[in-house]
Image (cartoon, rainbow, N blue to C red):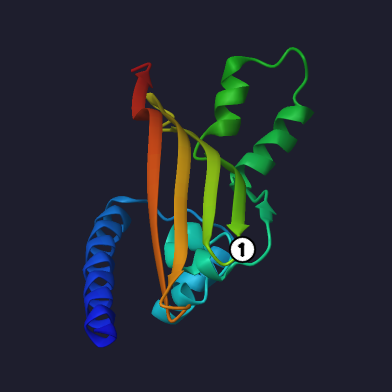
Amino acid sequence: MSRIRYHIRNFFVVIILLTLGGAYSLQAQTGELRRPGQGVRNLGMGNTGIGLSFDENALFYNPAGLASVDTILVGFPFLVEVSDDSVNIIKEVSKLSGDSKNADIVALLMGKRVHFRNLIDLNLIMPFGELMTFGAAHGIEWQFDFGVRNPVAIEIDFGARLDRINNFGFALPVARGRWLVGAGVETIERCDIPLTTATFGT
């Protein structure tokens, strides 16, 4: 009788794993990879790296890995991207005199690309002993692009995007820790101004 119960339990575990695996694969295909630092390294290692993500990165790449977290983890990762042209423009603009004309500023910006991207996250992983582990993350990403080209008919390219990302996940060990089962959900709210070109002059 105990052997029948054992096989029935394993059967249900397999069904749960297949169901969660399909749901997670669908979510992963529609998600976006934006994790800095260690998360990118784990992803670059392929399945091995993803399987070893027993930290806050497991919330994004491998929710089952949350089950191996045995301490409370709080993370505050941030990422800043600034193009080289942006730094040079700031230096040059600071040298302009107060009576500088718009033409001087346009000449300074001509052919340059201004790009700025900022990502701030707050991650929390909360284990409840050997029973279950919950994880949550909230992040905001802002991106800004600006460029000026064509000195004859001045063309200005402008675009901006603001993303609000929320991740939730849980994991629990099954069969005395022989298997780890986890699931995660990611939501992205986006407000953006698509890259648009405006032309001035003839």
Q: Nearer the viewer, residue 170 or 166?
A: 170
Q: Residue at x 45, y 52 (%)?
A: 169
* Residue 145 sits above or below residue 127 on the image: above
The percent position of residue 66, horizontal first and vertical second, equals 52, 64
Q: Residue at x 44, y 67 (%)?
A: 64
Q: Secondary structure at mark 1?
A: loop
Q: Is residue 93 left or right of residue 129?
A: right
Residue highlighted by disc 1: 129
The percent position of residue 46, horizontal first and vertical second, equals 41, 77
Q: Nearer the viewer, residue 155 or 2?
A: 2
* Residue 22 sits above or below residue 77 on the image: below
| Tag 1: amino acid | Gly
Q: Nearer the viewer, residue 13 or 197?
A: 13
Q: Is residue 179 left or right of residue 72?
A: left
Q: Residue at x 49, y 57 (%)?
A: 59
The percent position of residue 15, horizontal first and vertical second, equals 21, 68
Image-quadrant location for residue 90: top right
